[in-house]
């Protein structure tokens, strides 16, 4: 009778060890800084690095602190490549995206954003335009009458790079306060708000590691906006 001994599984590699090992590979140096790990209740980022005086401070979200070893190694390659201003290996990027695209991870991340995230919402009335009024008019013209109205507001700062966004976690549409000025044509505000309203009708789609925000159906509906060519031309002048 053959007796097989049951060996305990090897212990998982610590996050500090992973980052030290990857650092050595990227830097191609035998000298590795002391790695200090801080687990943070992040909402909008999975990790940050800070290197100073021979100490590499690794701050990662508690969502990833207990992730599989390969996922934490993927994060190490991504963050350290950024630190050294290099392109991270594509297979590690893909592995990280596949993990983050898992349904259970997405649900956890969504719940964390709702419970921890603090969203500034100014309200629909701006100095020049009332988003509540424009939303109702756009809904009557382009959307089903029962489409729910999210919270509407203007950003604290007049961003030129992010003119609008739909925050699914807080069910809010926020437009850049850059648009809330008399010199900005109403058509521009209508178009940007219409674009964000389409996210209510066309949620983000996940296909494996791919995350599609603007689907073909989204793009098709966007073309139905009356005056889209003029609106886009006006946006270029802002």
Image: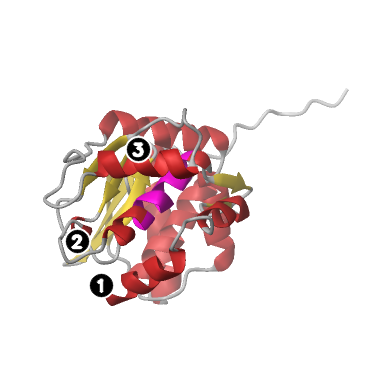
Q: Residues within 10 Å of mark 3 (few under 14, many from 20)?
A: few
User: Which of marks 1 and 3 precedes in the sequence?
Assistant: 3
Q: In what element is the residue under mark 2?
A: helix
Residue 98 drawn at (x, y percent): 57, 49
Q: Residues within 10 Å of mark 2 (few under 14, many from 20)?
A: some
Task: Evaluate whether residue 173 shows in this view.
Answer: yes
Residue 142 shown left or right of residue 83 in the figure: right
Q: Is residue 180 above or below residue 27?
A: above
x 42%, y 39%: residue:
139
Give the Cα distance between marks 3 and 1.
25 Å
Q: In what element is the residue under mark 1?
A: loop
Residue 92 drawn at (x, y percent): 54, 60
Residue 178 shown left or right of residue 3 in the figure: left
Give the Cα distance between marks 2 and 3.
22 Å
User: Which of marks 2 and 1 precedes in the sequence?
Assistant: 2
Give the Cα distance between marks 1 and 2.
9 Å
Magenta highlight range: 191-200
Number of numbered discs: 3
Residue wearing tag 2: 178
x 56%, y 67%: residue:
90
Q: What residue occupies the far left of the structure in this picture?
A: 127
Residue 238 got which mark?
Answer: 1
């Amino acid at each position: 009778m053959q007796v097989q001994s049951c060996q305990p599984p090897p212990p998982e590699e610590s996050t500090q060890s992973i980052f030290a090992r990857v650092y050595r590979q990227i830097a191609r140096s035998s000298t590795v800084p002391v790695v200090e790990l801080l687990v943070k209740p992040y909402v909008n980022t999975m990790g940050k690095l800070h290197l100073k005086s021979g100490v590499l401070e690794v701050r990662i979200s508690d969502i990833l602190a207990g992730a599989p070893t390969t996922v934490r190694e993927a994060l190490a390659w991504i963050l350290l490549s950024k630190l050294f201003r290099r392109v991270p290996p594509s297979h590690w990027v893909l592995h990280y995206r596949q993990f983050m695209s898992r349904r259970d991870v997405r649900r956890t991340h969504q719940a964390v954003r709702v419970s921890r995230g603090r969203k500034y919402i100014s309200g629909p009335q701006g100095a020049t335009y009332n988003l509540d009024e424009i939303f109702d008019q756009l809904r009557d013209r382009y959307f089903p009458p029962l489409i729910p109205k999210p919270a509407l507001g203007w950003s604290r700062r007049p961003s030129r790079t992010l003119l609008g966004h739909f925050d699914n976690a807080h069910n809010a549409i926020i437009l850049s306060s850059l648009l809330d000025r008399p010199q900005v044509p109403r058509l521009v505000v209508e178009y940007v708000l219409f674009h964000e309203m389409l996210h209510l009708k066309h949620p983000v789609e996940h296909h494996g590691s791919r995350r599609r925000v603007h689907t073909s159906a989204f793009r098709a509906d966007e073309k139905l906006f009356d005056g889209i060519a003029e609106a886009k031309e006006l946006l270029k002048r802002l």
